[in-house]
Amino acid sequence: MYDRLHHFYQHALALDNTPAPDKLTLHFPNDRPRKLVLDKSKLSQAEIALLNTLFHTNVAAHHQVTQENEWLYEWLINGHSPPKHKLERLTPPPLRCIHFSIKGEINETDAFIEAIKNVFPSVTNLLWKSRTEGVLLQHLPVDTVEEELSVESIIDTLATDFLIQTSFFIGSPIDSPHLLYERFKWETTLYDAVKMTFRKKSFFYEQEIVTYYLLHHIPESTLKLVSTMLDSVMNDRELMHSIKTYLECNMNTSLAAKKMYIHRNTLQYRVDKFIEKTSIDIKQFANAAAVYLLILRLEAK
């Protein structure tokens, strides 16, 4: 088996400098033993899903699946129909998936799991999709107002405590456990695609992942053509940062200026400067949307 796969996936063998999140490790315990490490960026999503399914026992080898989570693992990761009585006792809705990916080695797995559950309140289950990827199931109480998560601080804390880089995708709430499998698969497909392209972005939130997924599929030839619109301002980092913040604040000058700790008039001057240099009136929604999408895609390069 090892020799056949090694020959078939010669084009996708991982190198020493291949980033850890891009590596897919297949173990062959009955074959001398050996392991095959592939570069996921050179595989299709269908190939990755198939290999994960065929070699899913390797996840358990690194992160033991508890008896409580075994049926969830079989349902979400392997696609087996869940026992009805188990599904009825699943965490009550609304609930959501929180996907995460790790770059680096975790030496204290139990401590990491405990830290994850502490920073994300109401987490009821943690499942490992691979050695470096997992998903949390989080219950969102209906009668409480959830405070906005400071994902950046969570990532910084994990980096300090465990010397790893972590990426998160906070999924959207669902109101029925029966919707969990389809939502999980949909979110996994999008997250697997965008985290490969947008490596500099450490977290994604709810429906914004769709925007990044669409951007992921923009051909390089198209990107190169339309990016010429911003040639006159691309080297002005301060201006580009100000424009991106302005657009992210829904073109609210006062809010964006407050966020950047600058005077409103200063930001207004920068917006006018951008319009003058590019001839793109970003005070108009359609133009603002186009420029924002282009900035996001260019940042990934």
Image: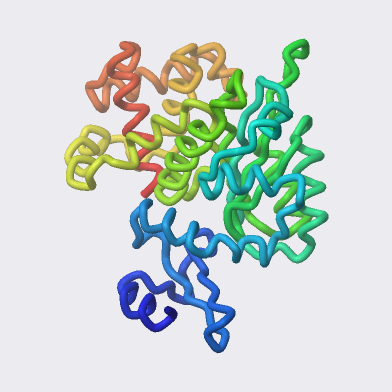
Residue at 60% of width from left, 46% of height from top? 100
Q: In terms of depth relative to the viewer, which is nearer, 133 or 69?
A: 69
Residue at 77% of width from left, 13% of height from top? 144
In the image, residue 57 lies at what x, y percent?
Answer: 60, 63
In the image, residue 167 lies at what x, y percent?
Answer: 58, 46
Residue 273 appears in the picture as rendered: yes
Q: In terms of depth relative to the viewer, which is nearer, 70 or 161?
A: 70
Left or right of residue 182: residue 97: right
Residue at the limit of the structure toward the bottom, as seen here: 32
Left or right of residue 298: residue 29: right
Residue 239 appears in the picture as rendered: no
Left or right of residue 96: residue 233: left
In the image, residue 20 lies at what x, y percent?
Answer: 54, 64
Up-down: is 176 above or below 128? above
Up-down: is 164 above or below 237? below
Residue at the limit of the structure toward the front, as seen here: 84
Q: Quadrant of the N terminus?
A: bottom left
Q: How many marks?
A: 0
Left or right of residue 50: residue 35: right
Q: In terms of depth relative to the viewer, which is nearer, 237 or 133?
A: 133
Residue at 27% of width from left, 21% of height from top? 276
The quadrant where residue 107 appears: bottom right
Up-down: is 224 above or below 57? above
In the image, residue 66 lies at what x, y percent?
Answer: 76, 52
Color theme of the render: rainbow
Residue at 56% of width from left, 60% of height from top? 56
Q: In terms of depth relative to the viewer, which is nearer, 108 or 78?
A: 78
